[in-house]
Amino acid sequence: MRQMLCTSASLAVLSTFVLVSAAQAQDPGQASDASARIVDEIIVTAQKREQRLQDVPIVVTSLSGQTLQDSGVRDIRELTILTPGLTVTSTTSETVVTARIRGVGTVGDNPGLESSVGVVIDGVYRPRNGVSFGDLGEVQRIEVLKGPQGTLFGKNTSAGVINIITAPPTRDVQAESEFSVGNYGAVGFSGSLSGPITDALSGRVFAAARARDGFQDVFTGAGPRGQTDDNDQHFYTVRGQLLFSPLESFDLRIIGDYTKREEFCCVGVQLAVGAGPSSRASSINAVRPGSIDPTSTPFDRQGYANRDTNQDVEDMGLSAEATWQVNDAVSLTSITAWRDWKTATGQDTDFTAADLLYRPGDGRNQVEFEQVSQELRLAGEAGPLNWLVGGFYAKENLKSRSLLLYGSDFYAYWAGQVLGGVPTVLGLVPGSIYRQDGGQDDTFDQDDTTWALFTNNSYAFTDALELTVGLRYTRDEKDIDSRYTTTASSCDQGEAAFGTIAGLVGQAAALQAVGGMCINTLNDDFDDLGLLRQSRKEEEVSGTAKLAYRWTSRIMTYASYSRGYKAGGYNLDREGRVLLTPTGPNFAANPDTSFAPELVDSYELGAKTSWLDGALILNAAAFHQTFTDFQLNTFEGAQFIVETIPEVVSRGVDADFIYTPPIDGLTLQGGVTYAQTEYSPFTAADLKVASRYPSLRRLPGARISFAPLWSATLAGSYERDLGDNLTLRTSMSGKYTSSYNTGSDLHPSKVQDDLVLVNARIGFGSRDERWAIELWSQNLFDQDYLQVGFNGPYQYNDSDAIAVYDAFLGAPRTYGVTLRLRH
């Protein structure tokens, strides 16, 4: 069965071209019907009103529900295969998700940083990319809007928006179900029922459950971890909707959803391991033999972890969207929403089988977002003027508890191997420092209140010339209470003994040794801050101006300017500073953990065109974006750094097309993005904390991480009747990306080479669509690739011969069979 599925999925790519050729040979008359070749009109809501894609002066990749199904897209991470210029990755767990457009995004490991790419589902803004990660269910369409969209879409969309519109209730009865099995023990089920309840009320309910074994092996050593694989899947989700239409002029759509995930993810693999007796790998194996293999390669998919990586996620929400057509020219829309998302995660923080550092998987290490939001829009038309005014309010509460605890091997490794035995020389024994289950236990409670007023107006000077002007005033207020707790610390003893250590090993070595004893996680000076309370308020005006000219009914060009804004905030991690005193260095806690807002100025020149009598839609735009105070979050090997980089510049070209060739049933869709996204030159003096510069030294003037120069997508589907009762449908989607660095510090070991990923699907079913069976494969050619490269935690050194570099991998080839039923 496995060989048959794999071979059949591979043949899906070839079968498309074979069957198309056969269609031309057997029935050449099909190509003569010009009306069948016209691309269906595509409606988008990129400007908060329904418009033809070709009338919107914005770069938009619009993906239908059928296209998403053909490509096997179930969540925003899989969306990348259909969208040039979009990259979505996950790291320490699948709740830590980062979306980037044209290379620009915000690393999601730190919940204090909001996302540069906003995710909106059914009009409701999700506060972080990870909060929006899950099974999307039945989707009507997805719109990926590139460039700043801060005028109309919620908040914090300085790089773009992923706008997801799910399928609404229907007035006719529809029932669908899907059953899937695949490799890695994958099983899945989903079902939906939609239809009328009364004359004025209709409903839809969708439910899905999926499970899969992990596709990464884990060596657990002495444990206590018992799970020997990782990156598994086990979740269920339910979404219910009601659509109430008591009047022709009024609709009320109520949506409730609930998702529960209980999975294991993610164990990193060794990307590059320094060799030799002084290397970190040798030191770890000296403490606990066999805990790390210096000879392994990343795509052996062999991870090392002695602690659990369980992730328990609960996501729920309720929204109500009311639309009232006040009269023929004016409409009022209100969207009220409440959402609650919480996750508890365990982690083997060192990614070795030695027991060095861990986050407990007993529910204490957790993050929770609760959000209430309200959006109100009044829109209308008055002759040549199309106007919109509105307001937005969001109240978000973020609670986080971050534990990073010492394992039983940490003292022997850190004190004896890394610090050269200095703690032992000072008489600091395991019972006094680095005691097992001691370490960092920090809590954060942040309230974020945002409200905004906005307007977006288009005025048609003539039938050909139209000006759009948008403006938004945003006020953002954040209040945070932070409390830091450290047990079994080493810092105070190291600082007090600085003179003694300097007499033994010299001033420079003493500074390095004491610094190693006082890294943020080990530093109990943070406890002296007590309950740290901080507050900040920001006011910002953003907006856009777009001038569009329609040369003919099929060609429109535009020029636009947009100002985007992403709020500043607070680092939800420890942030230290070094103070020099007459007796030596004082590695102190920084009581100011704030960072500045991120701003962007964006210019575009674009064209929306239609060719071949409507059979080809071809759109392109040249862009230039300048980001000021780009919010960077990077892991330097022992602690995270949050820093605002003075400037990032992104410039290039986006192009998208949809084509229906002169062959009945064949559709092609794709695009290309060329983006040169780089840090402008900067020095240590330009940073908030100058001492961070050595960790960021590769950045000035370099292309930023996750920013390939080229990315291109191509998706094709072909559908053909086979006799009177059967239909064949086959599809293929692929994405090419040129090489890019997957590490935020741009270390050369973290480069991902040029990559091509392909998904394929072939299926047969009844012409009335009552049943269909499909063979499918994701990552058809089993390409090995990195998601993220990072410095081995507590295993980093400036010398590559000593350091360990780790990585989180992309998924291998998966394949299976799906049965669809419709009633």
Image: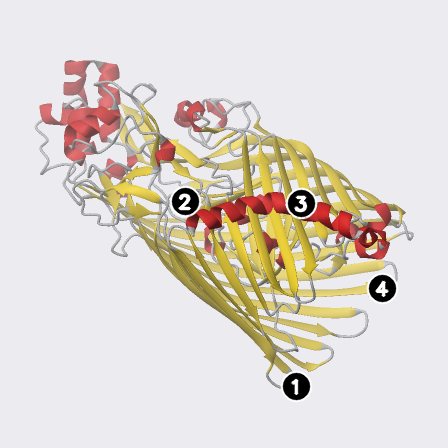
Q: Amino acid at mark 2?
A: Asn
How far apart marks 1 and 4 lie (CA) works out to 34 Å
**Is 658 left or right of 275, judged from the image as shown?**
right
Q: Which of the marked residues, 1 or 4, is nearer the chain's N terminus?
A: 1
Dots 1, 2 in contact, CB < 8 A: no
Q: Which residue corresponds to mark 3? A: 18
* Type of amino acid at the residue the image marks with label 3: Val
Q: Which residue is the site of mark 1?
A: 199
Residue shown at 28%/29% (left/top)? 795
* Position of the C terminus by quadrant: bottom right
Q: Are marks 2 and 4 in contact (CB under 8 Å)?
A: no
Residues under numbered marks 4 and 3 in contact, where contact means CB atoms less than 8 Å apart: no
* Upstream in sequence: badge 4 or badge 3: 3
Image position, residue 356 (x, y; %)? 21, 37
Q: Is residue 142 visible?
A: no
Q: Check the image and report above or below for 549 versus 445.
A: above
Residue 343 locus on image (x, y percent)? 36, 56
Q: Which mark is residue 382?
A: 4
Q: Residues within 10 Å of mark 3 (few under 14, many from 20)?
A: few
Q: Is residue 679 above or below residue 602?
A: above
Residue 432's image quarter? top left
Q: Secondary structure at mark 3?
A: helix
Q: Amino acid at mark 4?
A: Ala
Q: Earlier in the sequence, mark 2 or mark 4?
A: 2
Which residue lies under the disc numbered 2? 110
For the image shown, how many numbered marks are present on the structure?
Answer: 4
Amino acid identity at mark 1: Asp
Look at the numbered discs 2 and 3 and tell me whether their residues touch, using CB distance below 8 Å.
no
Disc 2 element: loop
